[in-house]
Amino acid sequence: MNLLLRWWKPRNTEASSAPVARERLQVLLSHERTAAGQSNLLGLIKEDVLAAIKRHITVPAEAVHVKVERRKAVSTMRISLDLPK
C-alpha cells in the first residue's frame, strides 16, 4: 500500500526547484547588467577614439566602422576607417 501511495502521490517539485530558478535568475540579471555596462563603456571608447582621429584628420562619423567581438574572457574592438584620397 505504501508503494502505491508514493506512486500516486503528487510530488512537490516547486519547493525543490525554486532555489535553482532563483539562482538562474540572479545569474541572468548579473550577466545583463555586465553586458549593459560593457556596451556603454565600448560606446565611450569609440567616441574617444573618434575624437582622437578627428584631431589629426577630417573624417565623417559614417566613415568609421566599429566591430566588437565578445568572447568568454576577452572583448575585442576593431575600428576601420574609410580615408579620403
Image: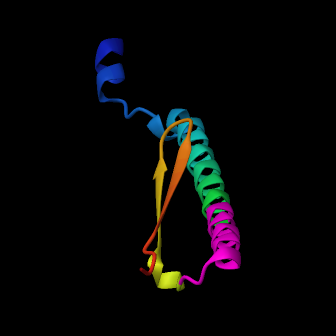
Residue 11 percent coordinates (x, y) = 41, 32
Q: Residue at x 64, y 49 (%)?
A: 30
Nearer-the-camera pick, 37 or 64: 64
Question: Which residue is more in the foreground, 50 or 32?
Answer: 50
Q: Position of residue 50 (x, y in %)?
A: 63, 73
Judge by depth and name the residue closer to the eye, 5 or 35.
35
Relative side of 74 to 12, left or right:
right
Is residue 53 or residue 10 the one in the foreground?
53
Tell me which residue sits at (37%, 34%) in the image: 10
Determine the residue positioned at 67% across, 64% down.
Answer: 45
User: At which x and y percent is residue 79?
Assistant: 50, 62
- Above or below, 13 against 42 in this view is above
Q: Is residue 11 above or below residue 47?
A: above
Query: Height in image: 83 above or below 12?
Result: below
**Residue sticking out furthest to the front:** 85
Q: How is the image coloured?
A: rainbow
Q: Quadrant of the N terminus?
A: top left
At x 36%, y 30%, the residue is 9
Percent position (x, y) of residue 36? 62, 62
Which SS type dominates the magenta stretch? helix
* Looking at the image, residue 44 lies above or below residue 71: below
Residue 56 magenta-drawn? yes
The quadrant holding residue 58 is bottom right
Label total for image: 0
**In the image, which residues are magenta?**
41-59
The C terminus, quarter of image = bottom left
Does the magenta-highlighted stretch encompass residue 57? yes
